[in-house]
Image (cartoon, coloured by chain):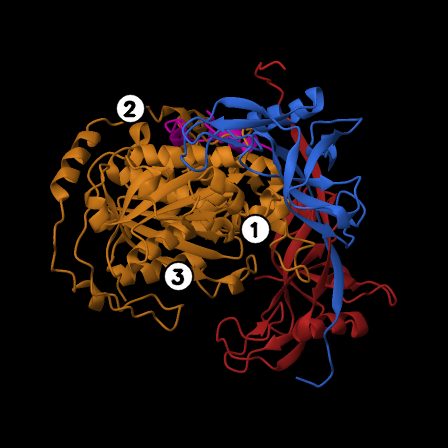
Chain colours: A blue, B red, C orange
C-alpha cells in the first residue's frame, strides 16, 4: 500500500419512523395520566409487590397480575444525576436533574425529571410531587416534572 | 377514579434520526478517491487466486490473504443480473421513500471478474436483458464527493453481447 | 469434534403470529411464547438456568430489549445471552442454546426469539445492513427478483408457475397450522396476478411482516430424563458464511451458502442421501423464488429435478419429501423468531405433535434451516432417538467447489448404540401417524385449466 493516507469520512444518517404500541396495559396507564392525572401501578398478589409502570405479569413469580393500584402522587428520590450536556433527543435543556423516584405505595422506581429546584439542592430521600402538563396526550411527559414537596 | 377497562390502544410515533459519519478506511478510501478524483474504478486483485474483488477489501474473501495489488477496471461492462423495483421503500440514508420504478443491476466490469452494483437508466422490462452492455455516466467535476453515487447511473448501450 | 453430552429439546412454544397486535407490548408478546413453552414442557421457571434471547432490534427501534424483557420472559436473576444475527437469529439462538447445554455450563436453557415487526420498517431495517459506502443507497432489503430472473431465463414461464405452485402449497399447509399468520386460500393464478414488486417477484411470493415469538427449551440428557414431555435430540448443526457470493447473479462459480452448509453437515454426520435419510425439512424461505432455488442447494439436486418434483407436488405434507408443513416463512415471518420456528416446527414433527399439519409415517430425522441477509446459512438436524455421541472426524473439503466425494470415512464410527428410552417415543409416533390430515389438495388444480402449454 502506498504511504498516502487514503482514509476520509463520509457523512450520512439513519432515519426511520417507528410506531410503538403501548398495549392494553400500557394504554390504560397513559390514559390515566392524560385523563385523570393519576399515576397507576399494578399489584402482584403472590409477591405482594406494586410495580410501576404497571404490567400484566410479575417478573419474579411469573404469575399474572390483574389488580390496578393508584400510587403516589408523592414519592421520595432514591437516586439522581445531573445532566449537563446537550443532545437532540433529551427532553429538556441542560442542566437538569434526572431522578429515580419511589412513589408512595410502589415497590419499583419511576424515572423522571426534577425541577423547580437547583441541582445542588437535590438530595436522596427528598420528597417530591408531580406537576402535570397543561396539554396532555397520553405520554409519560404528561407529568411535566416532579418538584420538591417538603 | 373509575376502574373500567379502557379499549383505547395508544400508539406512540417516533422518528429516529441519527447522524452518522462513516470512516472509509484505506482500502475503500482509495476506491472512492479514484472515482472522485480520476473517474477511475479500481479493484483489488488477489495474488493467490487472481480474483478481482469489489467491493475492495483488505483480504481476499476466498483465500484470506492480504491483497495489496490494485487493478483498474473499465467503467463499462455486462449486466449479469438486475432488479426492476416497482414498490416504493424507505431509504434509511435519507428518511425518504425511493421513487419507483428504478432498476438496480450487477455489472461485470471489463478487465476483471468483479461486479459492481448500481442503477441503470432503463426501467422498462422490455428494454433490459441479462447480457446487455452498459457504461458508467459520471457526475461532472465539482459534484463528485467520494461515493459510489459519483457515478450517476449506468447507461444501457444498444449493442448486445451473446453470453 | 463431538459434544460433551447430548442435548434434548424438552419444550416448544409459540405465540399466535399476527400482523397487527396493538393490544400488547413486546414484553407481553414474549411472555406468550415463554408461557406456551413452559406449559408444553411441564416445567416451571425455576427449572430454567439460562435464557438466550434474540431479535433484530432495528426493526422495533428499541435497543437491548433483552433487558426490558426480563420482566416478561422469566430471565429475572438468571444468566442470559443476547444474540442478533439477522434472519438467522432464531436458528443461531437454537445453536447457542445447544452449545451451552452441550458444554456442561448449563443444564436447561430457554431459547427465545421474537419480533414485533409492525413497529418499524422491515425493508428499511434490512437495507440498513448493507455497507453504507457500497450498496445501502441501492439495496432493497429482501425484495429482489434476481434469483427468479435466473430461473425464468433458464426455464421460461414454467419456472413462474412452479414458484406459484410452491406458494399455493405453503398456503395450504398454513391453513392446517393454527399458529401461522397468513392462512389464505389462493390459487396459482392468484399468485401470478398479484402485485409486481421486482420482476418476477410478486407480492404473494414474498413473506409477510408478522408479530410473534417462539421459545424452545433445551436440556441435558440427565435432566431431560426427569421431564414429562417427549424428548427429541439435537443431532448437529452448522453455520456457514458466504458473503463474497452475494453479488446477485452472474456466472456462479462458487456454490451458494446453502449448498456449502448442506455438504459440510451431511459429511460431518454421515448423511449420504438426504432425500431418503431426512424425513421432513423446515426450510427458511423468505420468498417462493428463493424456496424454489434453495431446495436444490440443500438437497443437492439440480434445478430440473427440483422443477419436476414441484410440479408433481412431491414437497407436500403427504408427498415424497415434505418441506415446510407449517406453511414456512412465506406464511409467518416475525424475523427474530422465524428461524427458531423452523426448529420448533421440525421438533413438533418429530414428536408427532404437529396436529393437522403433521407429516404422516415414520421418520427419525428432521432438518431446519435459517438464512441471513449477507448470505449465511444455519442448518440444524434433529433426531428422534438418542445414540451414543459419535466420534466424528471432521474433514472439511479445502476446495469448496468440488463435490464432497470423501464422505465414506467418518460415517462408519457409530455402531456403539446406547438406546436411552426409545420405546416410549416410538409408540406415541405410531399413534400420531394414524391421523392423516385429509384436506384434499384439489384446490391448486383449478389453476391448471388456465395455463398455456405446461407440461
Residue labelled with disc 2: C438
Which of the two labelled residues, at mark 3 and mark 2, occupies the earlier sequence position? 3
Q: Earlier in the sequence, mark 3 or mark 1?
A: 1
How far apart, in angstroms, are the residues tagged by discs 2 and 1?
Answer: 37 Å
How many numbered marks have been drawn onto this rendered protein structure?
Answer: 3
Chain where mark 3 sits: C
Write the residue at 22% across / 66% down: C410
Q: Main secondary structure of the magenta part?
A: loop
The quadrant the C terminus of chain C occupies is: top left
Q: Is residue B110 above or below residue B13?
A: below
Q: For residue C430, what is the image quadrant?
A: top left
Q: Are marks 3 and 1 on the same chain?
A: yes
Q: Which residue is mark 3?
A: C260
State the residue lying farthest toward the front.
A150
Q: Nearer the viewer, residue C198 or B2?
A: B2
Residue C168 visible to the viewer: yes
Residue receiving disc 1: C146
Amino acid at each position: 500500500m502506498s504511504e498516502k493516507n487514503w482514509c476520509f469520512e463520509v457523512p450520512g444518517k439513519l432515519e426511520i419512523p417507528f410506531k410503538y404500541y403501548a398495549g392494553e396495559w400500557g394504554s390504560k396507564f397513559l390514559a390515566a395520566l392524560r385523563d385523570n392525572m393519576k399515576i397507576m401501578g399494578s399489584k402482584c398478589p403472590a409477591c405482594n409487590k406494586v410495580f410501576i409502570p404497571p404490567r400484566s405479569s410479575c417478573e419474579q413469580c411469573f404469575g399474572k397480575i390483574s389488580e390496578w393500584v393508584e400510587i403516589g402522587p408523592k414519592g421520595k428520590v432514591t437516586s439522581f444525576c445531573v445532566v449537563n450536556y446537550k443532545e437532540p433527543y433529551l427532553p429538556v435543556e441542560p442542566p437538569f436533574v434526572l431522578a429515580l423516584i419511589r412513589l408512595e405505595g410502589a415497590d419499583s422506581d419511576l424515572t423522571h425529571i426534577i425541577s423547580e429546584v437547583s441541582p445542588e439542592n437535590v438530595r436522596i430521600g427528598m420528597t417530591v410531587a408531580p406537576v402535570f402538563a397543561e396539554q396532555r396526550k397520553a405520554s409519560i411527559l404528561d407529568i411535566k416534572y416532579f418538584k420538591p414537596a417538603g | 377514579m373509575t376502574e373500567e377497562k379502557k379499549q383505547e390502544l395508544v400508539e406512540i410515533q417516533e422518528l429516529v434520526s441519527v447522524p452518522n459519519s462513516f470512516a472509509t478506511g484505506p482500502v475503500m478510501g482509495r476506491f472512492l478517491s479514484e472515482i472522485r478524483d480520476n473517474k477511475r474504478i479500481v479493484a483489488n486483485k488477489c495474488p493467490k487466486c487472481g480474483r478481482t474483488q469489489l467491493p475492495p477489501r483488505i483480504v481476499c474473501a476466498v483465500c484470506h490473504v492480504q491483497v495489496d495489488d490494485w487493478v483498474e477496471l473499465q467503467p463499462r461492462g455486462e449486466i449479469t443480473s438486475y432488479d426492476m423495483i416497482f414498490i416504493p421503500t424507505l431509504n434509511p440514508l435519507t428518511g425518504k421513500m425511493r421513487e419507483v420504478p428504478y432498476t438496480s443491476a450487477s455489472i461485470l466490469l471489463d478487465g476483471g471478474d468483479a461486479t459492481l452494483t448500481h442503477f441503470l437508466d432503463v426501467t422498462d422490462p422490455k428494454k433490459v436483458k441479462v447480457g446487455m452492455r452498459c457504461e458508467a455516466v459520471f457526475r461532472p467535476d465539482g459534484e463528485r464527493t467520494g461515493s459510489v453515487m459519483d457515478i450517476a447511473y449506468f447507461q444501457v448501450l444498444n449493442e448486445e453481447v451473446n453470453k | 469434534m463431538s459434544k460433551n453430552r447430548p442435548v434434548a429439546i424438552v419444550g416448544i412454544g409459540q405465540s399466535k403470529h399476527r400482523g397487527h397486535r396493538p393490544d400488547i407490548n413486546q414484553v407481553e408478546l414474549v411472555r406468550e411464547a415463554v408461557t406456551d413453552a413452559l406449559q408444553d414442557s411441564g416445567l416451571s421457571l425455576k427449572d430454567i438456568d439460562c435464557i438466550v434471547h434474540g431479535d433484530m432490534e432495528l426493526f422495533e427501534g428499541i435497543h437491548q430489549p433483552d433487558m426490558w424483557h426480563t420482566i416478561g420472559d422469566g430471565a429475572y436473576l438468571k444468566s442470559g445471552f443476547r444474540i442478533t444475527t439477522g434472519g438467522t437469529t432464531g436458528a443461531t439462538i437454537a445453536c447457542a442454546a445447544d452449545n451451552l447445554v452441550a458444554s456442561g455450563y448449563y443444564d436447561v436453557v430457554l431459547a427465545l426469539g421474537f419480533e414485533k415487526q409492525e413497529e418499524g420498517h422491515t425493508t428499511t431495517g434490512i437495507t440498513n445492513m448493507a455497507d453504507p459506502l457500497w450498496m445501502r443507497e441501492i439495496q432493497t432489503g429482501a425484495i429482489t427478483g434476481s434469483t427468479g430472473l435466473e430461473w425464468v431465463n433458464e426455464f421460461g414461464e414454467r419456472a413462474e408457475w412452479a414458484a406459484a405452485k410452491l406458494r399455493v402449497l405453503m398456503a395450504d399447509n398454513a391453513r392446517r397450522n393454527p399458529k401461522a399468520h397468513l392462512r389464505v386460500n389462493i390459487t396459482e393464478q392468484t399468485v401470478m396476478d398479484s402485485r409486481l414488486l421486482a420482476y418476477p417477484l410478486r407480492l404473494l411470493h414474498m413473506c409477510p411482516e408478522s408479530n410473534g415469538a417462539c421459545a424452545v427449551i433445551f436440556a441435558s440428557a440427565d435432566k431431560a430424563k426427569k421431564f414429562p414431555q417427549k424428548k427429541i435430540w439435537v443431532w448437529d448443526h452448522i453455520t456457514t458464511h458466504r458473503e463474497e457470493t452475494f453479488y446477485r447473479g452472474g456466472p456462479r462459480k462458487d456454490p451458494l451458502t446453502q449448498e456449502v452448509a448442506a455438504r459440510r453437515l451431511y459429511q460431518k454426520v454421515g448423511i449420504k442421501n438426504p432425500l431418503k435419510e431426512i424425513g421432513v425439512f423446515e426450510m427458511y424461505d423468505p420468498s417462493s423464488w428463493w424456496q424454489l432455488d434453495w431446495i436444490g442447494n440443500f438437497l443437492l439436486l439440480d434445478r430440473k429435478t427440483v422443477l419436476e418434483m414441484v410440479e408433481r407436488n412431491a414437497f407436500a405434507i403427504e408427498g415424497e419429501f415434505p418441506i415446510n408443513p407449517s406453511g414456512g416463512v412465506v406464511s409467518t415471518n416475525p424475523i427474530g423468531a422465524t428461524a427458531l420456528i423452523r426448529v420448533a416446527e421440525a421438533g413438533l414433527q418429530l414428536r408427532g405433535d404437529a396436529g393437522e399439519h403433521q407429516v404422516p409415517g415414520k421418520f427419525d430425522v428432521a432438518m431446519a434451516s435459517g438464512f441471513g441477509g449477507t448470505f449465511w446459512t444455519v442448518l440444524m438436524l434433529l433426531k428422534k432417538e438418542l445414540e451414543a455421541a459419535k466420534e466424528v472426524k471432521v474433514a472439511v473439503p479445502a476446495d469448496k467447489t468440488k463435490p464432497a466425494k470423501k464422505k465414506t470415512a467418518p460415517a462408519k464410527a457409530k455402531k456403539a448404540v446406547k438406546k436411552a428410552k426409545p420405546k416410549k417415543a416410538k409408540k406415541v409416533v405410531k399413534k400420531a401417524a394414524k391421523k392423516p390430515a385429509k384436506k384434499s389438495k384439489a384446490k391448486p388444480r383449478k389453476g391448471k385449466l388456465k395455463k398455456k402449454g405446461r407440461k
